[in-house]
Every structure is written in C-alpha cells, then in structure tokens.
Image (cartoon, grey):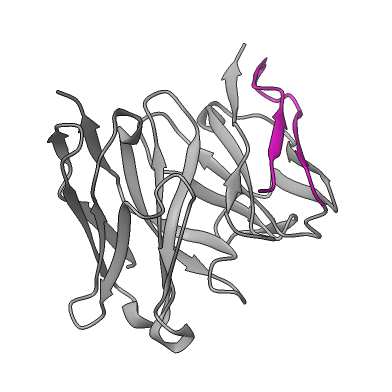
Amino acid sequence: DIHMTQSPSSLSASVGDRVTITCQASHDINKYLNWYQQRPGKAPKLLIYDASNLETGVPSRFSGSGSGTDFTFTISSLQPEDIATYYCQQYDDLPLTFGGGTKVEIK
Amino acid sequence: EVQLVESGGGLVQPGRSLRLSCSGSGFTFGDYFLSWVRQAPGKGLDWVGFIRSKAFGGTPEYAASVQGRFTISRDDSQSIVSLQMNGLKSEDTAVYYCTRGVGHSGYDFFDYWGQGSLVTVSS
C-alpha cells in the first residue's frame, strides 16, 4: 500500500496568512495526487486534482504543486471560510489512500 | 445538479449485517465508477471500495480491511449503488460517504460526495 504522510497535523494562522501543507508519498506516485477540504460536519470537497489542477469553482487562492513523492498545498491568503481539515489522496495504485489530514484553524 | 444521497445507516450489533444505498441523480449514473469512503468518529478518510461502470466490466475493488465482508453492487436502471456489510465489527463504526469517481482510470478523483450515512456497530 502507498502510505501518505501529511504535515503538519494541525496549524493555526491569521486571516491573510499564507498557509502551506505538505504531503509525502511512500512511493513515487507521479502526479496522481488530489487535495480535499472537509469543513466541520460536512462531506469532503475536491479542491485540487492531479497535483496542481484547480477544480472548477474553487477560489484561486488554493494551489497545489509537486510530483513523485513530495507535494505541497497552499492557501495564499487564509480566509475565515477556509477553516477545515485538508486531506491529500493518491490514486496511483490500489488501495486508494488518504493522508491523515491537516486541521487549519484561525489564530 | 449532481446529487448523491445515502440511506440505510443506523445502529447494529457486532456480527450483524447492514445495507447502505446511494441514489444518484443529475448525471448519467451508469457512466461512472462509484466509491464508498468512510470516516470513523474524529478520524480521517478511509477508502472502502468502488464499483466500475459497466463499460469497464462493472466489477468491484475493496480495501483489505473489508474484503470478504463487504459487497458493492449497482443497479444502473435505478441509479443506485449499494454497500452490503456483513460481519460488522466495532471498527466499522463510521460515517459512510458515497462518491462519484472521474478521470482516465474512472477513479482518479472524487468530484461529488453524498452527505454521509452513520453506521454504529455496538452491542
């Protein structure tokens, strides 16, 4: 199985701050990496697919980069509505696996 | 508008069975892979399995933790995907989400999710 390691597990930042989350895969997964946002009590929502492609309708302050084993997710200017847990997920191989999540809070 | 609506969750004793259903609308149901993803209370996301579209054989794949106990099936005429869960264990307690898979492989990413259905396994 491909293990996905996210860091940090949580972070606190101020509105307007740049926020960066990393995701490391245990094997080379090319660019087969997605990012989801899960607001409290809600279903996850796709933000980024194929490492760097922004899903339709998602604000441009969200971005992703990376390939191989190391990936980065960035919120360029944190907004109050971005309070959520963010997950990376690989689809290079079955079983599909998720990172442990990063909980983002407002300072 | 694409919608996925799960039903069938509830409280069940260990060792018993439960069947979840997911009804899709707003898209051509039969063209898509459908996955189940679960989330234990306070924990992260955990892929359970998916079923391919008929064009790709209509066959399922499962996570090792549920292989042999859970069965995913689909009825494209009713736009329903089902998750039959047998031999339930306490560690199966979770919110179960139905998701639509898209992309070249059919499961590249999940673009729509249901609201989730809570399954609690307890005596």
Question: Horizontal placement of B77 versus A83: left or right?
Answer: left
Image position, residue A107 (x, y; %)? 62, 11
Q: Is residue B82 magenta?
A: no
What segment carries the magenta color? A1-27
Q: Is residue A40 above or below residue A42?
A: above
Q: Is residue A25 magenta?
A: yes
Which residue shows up at 39% across the image and 80% down it? B58
Which residue shows up at 75% across the image and 56% down it? A52
Which residue shows up at 49% across the image and 49% down it? B64
In this rendered view, identify the residue nearer to me: B89 or A56.
Answer: B89
Query: Which quadrant of the structure image shows residue A74?
Result: top right
Image position, residue B1 (x, y; %)? 32, 68
In this rendered view, identify the residue nearer to me: B121 or A99.
Answer: B121
Report whether residue B82 is seen: yes
Q: Is residue A96 above or below residue B46?
A: below
Name the outermost residue toward the bottom.
B55
Report whether residue B28 is seen: no
Image position, residue A31 (x, y; %)? 78, 59
Q: Is residue B73 above or below residue B89?
A: below
Name the outermost residue toward the top.
A107
Query: Which quadrant of the structure image shows residue A70?
Result: top right
Total residue callouts: 0
Image position, residue B114 (x, y; %)? 32, 53
Q: Is residue A95 above or below residue B117?
A: below
Which residue shows up at 60% across the image and 24% down it? A104
